[in-house]
Amino acid sequence: MRWSELPAGTFLYKADPQRGAEWARLFARHAPQLDFRIWPDVGDPAKVRYLAAWLPPDDLGAFPRLELIFSIGAGIDQFDLAALPPELPLVRMVEPGIAAGMAEYVTLAVLAIHRQWATYAAQQRKHAWRALRVRPASACRVGVLGLGVLAQAALAQLVRLGFDCAGWSRSARALDGVACHAGAAALPDFLARCDILVCLLPLTADTRNILNRALFDALPRGAALVHVGRGGHLVQQDLLDALNDGQLAQAVLDVCEPEPPPADHPFWEHPAIVLTPHIASMTQPETAVTVVLDNLLRHHRGQALEGLVERTRGY
Ligand code: NDP
């Protein structure tokens, strides 16, 4: 068996227990030597070697033999990096299932905006049969903030559909069919060519509040926002102002701070906002467990881990 050389020990899972039960079945099948446990059933804390969590336990000191922490999600902003022992590797979720889900959601949102789905829904309610001009995808300029694993999966689909694609990242990147921009100095030129802006950045000290009035004003008038990063990227009142004065035409928001927004929050009712409950993508147990076990094998063999978080840059 591929993972038979992994040593015995406890793998502690601390996230959604329903999906945890699927992880448990997969671990039992692929690596039965590991004692897979779902929080709060930790067993003997001294035997816990690995932890996979959305939110880690408050007291990691209770697990003296912990060797590795996995984030259950692609992002790690929910972890307090300062509270983690500096020598403990933190690995984020880089798995094909989450990338495929994100590519679906972003493509769905971009197509819905491009093909004016909201307008047709409103027309239907008024019994109006009215065709709007259909423009080719090549006439629609889509830009993605962030050019990481998830952005690349989404862009691959958008390029295939013929959209005029660009992206922005911290360091220089080269992607087929995508005009790549890098660094703060390149941001204005990038924004000026985005009819639809997609945010797929990690939330860090540098990117918090990046979706603000100045950024919206740098987009072409009437642009749309698809926000699938983290709620902390967005200055909410700036979005509402930009929508209300027509600088932005619409926004699709999958993330919010807090989640969910309070019952009286204007996002719920705003006619130009589509709000979804942080479901753009989810870690898929089948593919995630394979990726996690492969990383355990790399760790066991002293090889570099995939998805290792660089603490200093915060993602
Ligand atoms: P990656 O780490 O693979 O990619 C992050 C990208 O953002 C990189 O291209 C990086 O630049 C860029 N970046 C980071 N900081 C800056 C900065 N200061 N300026 C410019 N670019 C920057 O992450 P993933 O693609 O795997 O995930 C991205 C995010 O998506 C997650 O952190 C999470 O917030 C969100 N997410 C949302 C989900 C949802 O359901 N809504 C599900 C999963 C993730 P460089 O290439 O130079 O490193």
Image: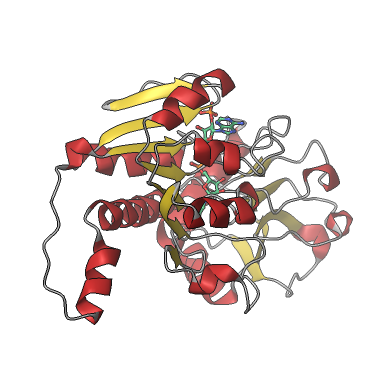
Q: Position of residue 18 (x, y in %)?
A: 53, 77
Pick the front one: 274 or 76: 274
Pick the front one: 144 or 73: 144
Pick the front one: 224 or 63: 224
In the picture, the quarter occupied by the C terminus is top right
Query: In the picture shown, does residue 254 fall above or below 298?
Result: below
Q: Quadrant of residue 262?
A: bottom right
User: Which residue corresponds to the image point at 65% horizontal and 61% vertical from the top-left?
Assistant: 257
Q: Position of residue 105 (x, y in %)?
A: 36, 57
Query: In the picture shown, does residue 222 fall above or below 237?
Result: above
Left or right: where 40 falls relative to 159: right
Pick the front one: 263 or 176: 263
Q: Is residue 228 visible?
A: no
Q: Position of residue 196 (x, y in %)?
A: 36, 44
Left or right: where 147 falls relative to 82: left
Q: Quadrant of residue 201?
A: top right
Left or right: where 81 falls relative to 310: right
Q: What colour scheme governs how the chains and residues are painted in the rendered image of this protein?
A: secondary structure
User: Which residue corresponds to the image point at 76% horizontal and 71% vertical from the top-left?
Assistant: 43
Q: Is residue 89 visible?
A: yes
Query: In the picture shown, does residue 113 fall above or below 119?
Result: above
Q: Position of residue 164 (x, y in %)?
A: 26, 33
Q: How many marks?
A: 0
